Image (cartoon, rainbow, N blue to C red):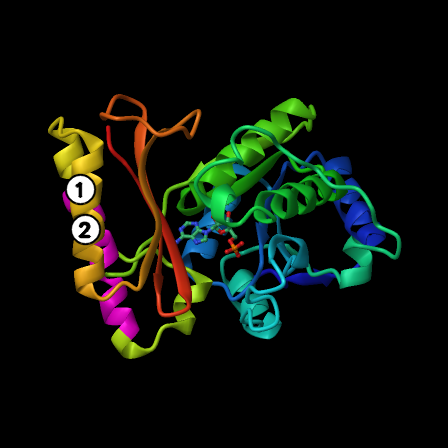
Amino acid sequence: MAVLEIIRSVAELRAKTAQFRGAHATVGLVPTMGALHDGHLTLARSAKLDNVRVIATLFVNPRQFSPTEDFGAYPRDEAADAAMLEKVGVDVLFAPGMEDVYPEGFSTSVSVGGLTQHLCGATRPHFFGGVATVVTKLLLMALPDRAYFGEKDFQQLQVIRRLVRDLNIPTQIVGVPTIRESDGLAMSSRNAYLSPAQRKIAGALPQVMQETVAELRNGLVAAPALAAAKARLHKAGFDRVDYLELCDEQSLQPIAIARPPARLFIAAYVGKTRLIDNWPVI
Ligand code: AMP
C-alpha cells in the first residue's frame, strides 16, 4: 500500500502537483472538511478510478459557518481521516493551517448569484460565499484535472459547476451519488451529533422523501404532497423543517408539478442537528 503524504503549505502542494504533471499523471482532487465516512471515501475511490494521482484536502472552513453555527464543535480527527484515505489509496492529504488559506488581510470572496438565493442559501446566507471562496482557492492551488463533490450537497455541486464555468477554471467537476446508511439516511459528518433516540427519528427522513418522490412521480401537485410530507416528519419527531421543495435541477427554482429534471430537496432539524438530503424525482 502506498504511503499517504501529508502536506501543509500551498508551496509544497504546488511542487507536488508540478511533479505529478511532469510525469504526465492526471490529478483528481477530493475536498473535505474531515470527519470522514464512506461518502467521502466513495468520492476518493471515484477519483482513484479516473486519475493516476489523488489529492484529498482537509480544511474546516470557518467562512461557511455563521457565528451561531457549529464551527467550534465540528468533529475533527486528522489521524483517523489520514488512515482511511491511505487505505483507499489516496496519494496526498493537503491539510493546511488557517494562515495558509486565509493569511492576514485576506479580503477577497467569490460570490455566485442566482443559484445561491434559494434552498440552503435562504436560511444560511453566509454559506455559499464561504464554500465558493474556499473551493475556488483549493482548485487554483492544486489545478487538478478533475474534482469530486457529492450529490448529497446538490445545491453546492451546482454552485461549484457554475463558478468553474464562469471563472474558466480548467477542472472537470464530477458529481458522485449519495452514499446512505442501511435505513437510507444520507451519511454525514453531522450524524455524529445525533443521540440514539434522535438517530431513530432521523431514519424517517429518507422514508418520507421516498414516499413523496413516488407521489410526485405519479403526477401529484407539489404543494399538498409537500405539506403532507412535512406533517409526517413532524409526527415522526422532527423539530423543524427548514424547507421541503420540488425544484428544477438546473435552476434550483421551485416547480409546481414534477417535470424532468426535477429533484426533491429537504433541510430539517432533529434537535439542534440540521440534516439535508435530496432525491431525483424523474
Ligand atoms: P464535507 O466534508 O461534509 O464538506 O463533504 C465533503 C464532500 O463529501 C462534499 O463534496 C460532500 O458532498 C461529499 N459527501 C458528504 N456526504 C456524502 C455522502 N453521504 N455521499 C456522497 N458524498 C458525500
Q: Is residue 155 magenta?
A: no
Instruction: Classify residue 163 as left or right of residue 158.
Output: right
Q: Which residues are magenta?
A: 198-211
CB within 8 Å, label 2 to label 1: yes
The main secondary structure of the magenta stretch is: helix
The residue that disc 2 covers is: 208
Q: Is mark 2 within 8 Å of ligand 1?
A: no
Dividing the image into 4 quarters, which one contains the N terminus? Answer: bottom right
Label 1 element class: helix
Q: Nearer the viewer, residue 245 or 130?
A: 245
The quarter of the displayed image where residue 111 is located: top right
Q: Is residue 39 visible?
A: yes
Compute the Cα span from label 2 to label 1.
6 Å
Label 2 element class: helix
Instruction: Classify residue 251 as left or right of residue 159.
Output: left
At label 2, which amino acid type do we have? Val
